[in-house]
Amino acid sequence: MSFFLSLSRFIDALNEKVGSAVSWALLLSVLICTGNALIRYSLHTSSNAWLEIQWYLFSAIFLLGTSYTLRRNEHVRIDVVVGHFSKRTQVKIDIAGFLVFLLPMSLIILYYAVPYAWLSIQNQEVSSNAGGLIVWPAKLLIPVGFFLLTLQGISELIKRIGFLQGKVEASAFDKHATTPEEEIEAIKAANNLN
């Protein structure tokens, strides 16, 4: 089990790094959107490339951010019923969900997404819009995103099995809510940057 727990920690660290990097895509997307709107309305000109890069960045945020969100246990859940169960029962429900829904669907999407992206790369696919961008990087995000999601699903499965065996604390996969003290420290740190 120690090998699997080490693998889980590696996957968690990888997805934490990817999630942190992708968070910058959100800022870049907002800046591009704002700049594009200002130029369009003030100079009455625009480019399809600016619109497409916004779509690409949104795709990156969504597809690469899902594994980070799963890592932090922040996907939308309906805990009205499950919240009343014991922690062990909740973990067993999570394991069933990973095995029956998340991992099979991620693998099916990967199965179809890899050839889809590969064909786009081979053909050096370009947008059909005038002034558009190359398309294959956006299509490549699909298998990369679902590969990372599959890895994170495996990591979450390992942690929950470890919990049932008494080798992992529930804090390893519980929702990572920030405390008021942590938020205050983050605000202070942000103010020190200015």
Image (cartoon, rainbow, N blue to C red):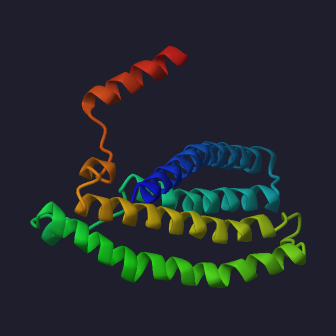
Observer-nearest of 60 and 46:
60
Residue 41 horizontal/vertical position (percent): 72, 49
Residue drawn at x 50%, y 56% as measured from the top left = 7
Residue drawn at x 24%, y 73% as measured from the top left = 93
Residue 8 horizontal/vertical position (percent): 46, 56
Residue 104 in the image: above or below residue 173: below
Quadrant where the C terminus is found in the figure: top right
Residue 147 horizontal/vertical position (percent): 59, 68
Q: Is residue 28 left or right of residue 43?
A: left
Q: Is residue 8 left or right of residue 26?
A: left
Residue drawn at x 25%, y 61% as measured from the top left = 165
Observer-nearest of 77 and 18:
18
Q: Residue furthest front?
A: 2
Residue 65 horizontal/vertical position (percent): 53, 57
Quadrant where the N terminus is found in the figure: bottom left
Image-quadrant location for residue 139: bottom right
Residue drawn at x 52%, y 55% as measured from the top left = 11
Image-quadrant location for residue 157: bottom left
